[in-house]
Each structure stands twice: as C-alpha cells, then as structure tokens.
Image (cartoon, grey):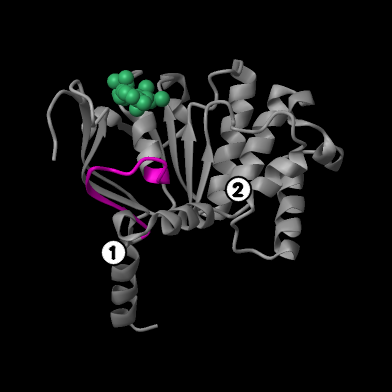
Amino acid sequence: MTLKENISNDKIINQVAAIELQNVVHTYGKQQANSKSLHFSQWKVEIGQQVFLYGDSGSGKSTLLNLLSGILAPQQGSIKLFGTEMSDLSNSGRDRFRAENIGVVFQQFNLIPYLSVAKNIELAVYFAKSSKQQLVESLQQLMAALKLPSSILHTPVSSLSVGQQQRVAIMRAFINAPKLLLIDEPTSALDNSAKHGFMTLLLEMCQAHNTTMIFVSHDTGLEPFFSLRTPITSFCNGISDEVVG
Ligand code: ADP
Ligand code: MG
C-alpha cells in the first residue's frame, strides 16, 4: 500500500465515529405546563472504544441511552451512529437499525423471566440479518465463552442464578454481533465478586469483537475497569425548565 493510500484510509477511518451527537434536546412532558428539557451539547465516541459514563442519579444517563437506542426521539439536534443520522430514518427504519446494530443490557437485564433462555434469545434475533445457521453458531460460541451449559437453554430465566442471568443478558446483547452496546447500571444488584466477573467478561467480549460500548453507572468503584471515563456533566447540564422548540 502506498503512503498516499495509507493516509486516505486513515482519513476514512477517522471520519466515521461510532457516536456523534450535537445539540440534542429531549423534553419530558412536552404537552404540559411544567415540561422540562435535557440538553446534550456535543459528544463523540470513536469506533471500538469502551466508555465509562458516570454521573449522579437524575443527571440524564438513561435518557441519553434511550435517545441513542432510538427508544426516545430527540426534539432537536443530531445523533449520528456510524455515520447514519437517526432523524433521517423512519420509525421502522430506526427499529431495524437498532436491531441490526445496537445491543442493550439495562438494569434488570430485561429478560422475560417466565420464558426459557432460548425463547429470550429468539426474541432478540427476531429482526436480525443473520441466517439461522449463523445464529446457532454464534449462540454456541457465546455459550462456550460465557461458560453457560447448554442445559440452561430450556430453563426459564427465573430459575437461573443472578450470575447466570447476567451472562444470558450479555449473550443476548451480543447475539446479533452489535456494533454498539449500551449498558445501563447492570451491576447494581450484584455483590463485589460477581461485579468483577461481569465487568471482566463484558470488556473481554467487547475487545474480542471490537464492539463500541457505553457503560453507564453512578458506581465510581467500576471506573478502574475503563481507560476512558466521561462525566455526563461534561456535555449535559441536567434537567432545566428551559422551553425548547
Ligand atoms: P439518570 O439515568 O442519570 O438517573 P434520567 O435520564 O433517568 O437520569 O433522568 C434525567 C432527568 O429526567 C431526571 O430529572 C428525571 O427526573 C427526568 N425524567 C426521566 N424520565 C422521565 C419521565 N419519563 N418523565 C419526566 N421526567 C423524567
Ligand atoms: Mg438511570
């Protein structure tokens, strides 16, 4: 490869960020007199980075993750994920984009307790682009990596230990090979040794798959796991009465 090609390739790599957010506003209670807004000024995360995003309770962390995953639509501003402007997509386009590119692990691991592990995974792959064969293969790989015995596949999630539930939640988040993982305070129910295992596994999986991850927590004890740490206050001023739009 010539020097020139090298430079232009670098340029392409540098141009597309995993997340690029600019002047994003979300208003809660828009129809009400006491509506309140959150304003996110500017934030950029490069592809393959794992970021510890921290801030006090109520500082806007979950709102941000919901905006990134498309569960909430911003009233203003730009959210670009891997170069795609979210507001350019229709509702169904956003759903598809999310299914194909984003994995989420939220506080309660969002597993459906009375369904088996296999059914929970099936729900996650409903929109996926991969073939059944590919899915079975990635499921087998993930179960091995996460040290989950195949016997749990037909066990209802509610009969698993918390540690196994976590690993199932990680597996479900990775099953579609997401480019972006959004994780919201998943460790709050865990004791310290379980926390350590969860974090180590999660980061290993991200590094192995070059997955970009935003890990949200108010637990600053988790900081040492990350080389990149961002306070949400560096780009969000918290909730205000400011009338927007
Ligand atoms: P965090 O996840 O950092 O604790 P949130 O994003 O949940 O913060 O909340 C940010 C602010 O938005 C808080 O002041 C919260 O009260 C407010 N908020 C969150 N969800 C809603 C909602 N559904 N309706 C009204 N206000 C909300
Ligand atoms: Mg929250």
Quadrant of the picture in which ligand 2 is shown:
top left
Label 2 crowding class (10 Å Cα cut-off): few <14, some 14-19, many 20+?
Answer: many
- The residue pinned by badge 1 equals 15
Where residue 182 sits: x, y (%)? 47, 40
Question: Where 143 sits versus 10, above or below?
Answer: above
Mark 1 residue element: helix
Q: Earlier in the sequence, mark 2 or mark 1?
A: 1
Q: Which residues are magenta?
A: 68-82
The residue at the point 63 percent across, 36 percent down is 169
For the residues carrying marks 2 and 1, which lies nearer the camera in this image? Answer: 2
Residue 31 vs residue 45: left or right? left
Mark 2 residue element: helix
Three-letter amino acid code at the position of disc 1: Gln
Mark 1 sits near ligand 1, with its Cβ under 8 Å away: no
Where residue 48 sits: x, y (%)? 44, 52
Where residue 245 sits: x, y (%)? 13, 40
Residue 27 vs residue 48: left or right? left
Name which quarter of the figure residue 25 lies in.
top left
Residue 123 vs residue 240: left or right? right
Verify whether residue 34 appears in magenta.
no
- The residue pinned by badge 2 equals 174
The residue at the point 46 percent across, 20 percent down is 221
